[in-house]
Structure formats: structure tokens, C-alpha cells
Image (cartoon, helix red, strand yellow):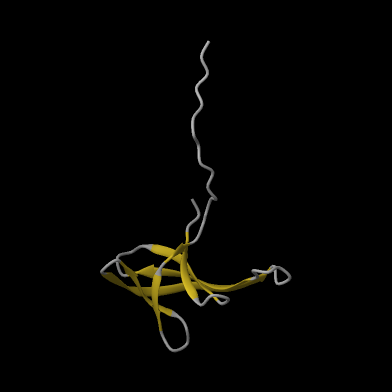
């Protein structure tokens, strides 16, 4: 009998990915840039804020927006208030 070992990598599910977002003066997303393609935000459906793990070395402080883009794609993006960077949050 032979045993085969497969090299499997573990990765976190739902890891946010950096994204380029243009925001208006109030901080709301107005467009998202994918490579050389700029897509306007057509609608803001929901916004919420998460402040968590403030006692840790890397606290979580984020403002989320559920947005629809001009091509019909709906996504959640957030501004990390600790690093001032934008991310896209996927759920799958």
C-alpha cells in the first residue's frame, strides 16, 4: 500500500483585498478602480461601522459601505480607519 501526501496550503476565508476607491469630501465612495478601469458608484445601499479588539496591538476600526457599481455589481467595501486603506470584503 502506498500513501500519497498532498501539499495543501491553508488560507483564511473571506480575507479582505486591497482596492482603489475614490471618495467624496464626506468619505463616501464615488468610484472603484480595477486596473485601468474606473467604475462609478451608482447607489449606496447601507453603511455601518465596526470598532473591535481595541485592546489588541492591531485594533479593528472600519467603515463599511454596500455599494452598486455602474456595471450592476454590488459589493461591500470598507475604509480601514487605522491604516487609511480601502478594501473589498468578499464572503466566499
Find residue 47 and report its horizontal and vertical position in percent.
Answer: 53, 74
View extreme (top): residue = 1
In-image side of 81 versus 41 (left or right):
right
Foreground of the two, 5 or 55 = 5
Q: Residue at x 41, y 68 (%)?
A: 19
Above or below, 28 relative to 16 = below
View extreme (left): residue = 36
Find residue 46 and report its horizontal and vertical position in percent.
Answer: 51, 72
Find residue 40 and report its horizontal and vertical position in percent.
Answer: 32, 74
Foreground of the two, 34 or 92 = 34
Q: Residue at x 47, y 87 (%)?
A: 26
Q: Residue at x 70, y 72 (%)?
A: 54
View extreme (right): residue = 55
Q: Residue at x 55, y 50 (%)?
A: 12
Find residue 7 and report its horizontal and vertical position in percent.
Answer: 49, 34
The image quarter in which residue 58 lies: bottom right
Foreground of the two, 31 or 7 = 7
Above or below, 61 relative to 72 = below
Number of numbered discs overlaid on the protein picture: 0
In-image side of 21 versus 90 (left or right):
left
Amino acid at each position: 500500500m502506498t500513501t500519497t501526501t498532498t501539499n495543501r496550503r491553508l488560507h483564511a476565508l473571506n480575507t479582505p483585498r486591497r482596492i482603489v476607491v475614490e471618495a467624496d469630501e464626506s468619505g463616501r465612495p464615488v468610484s472603484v478602480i480595477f486596473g485601468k478601469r474606473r467604475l462609478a458608484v451608482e447607489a449606496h445601499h447601507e453603511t455601518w461601522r465596526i470598532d473591535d479588539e481595541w485592546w489588541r496591538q492591531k485594533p479593528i476600526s472600519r467603515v463599511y459601505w454596500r455599494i452598486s457599481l455602474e456595471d450592476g455589481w454590488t459589493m461591500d467595501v470598507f475604509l480601514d480607519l487605522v491604516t487609511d486603506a480601502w478594501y473589498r470584503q468578499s464572503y466566499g
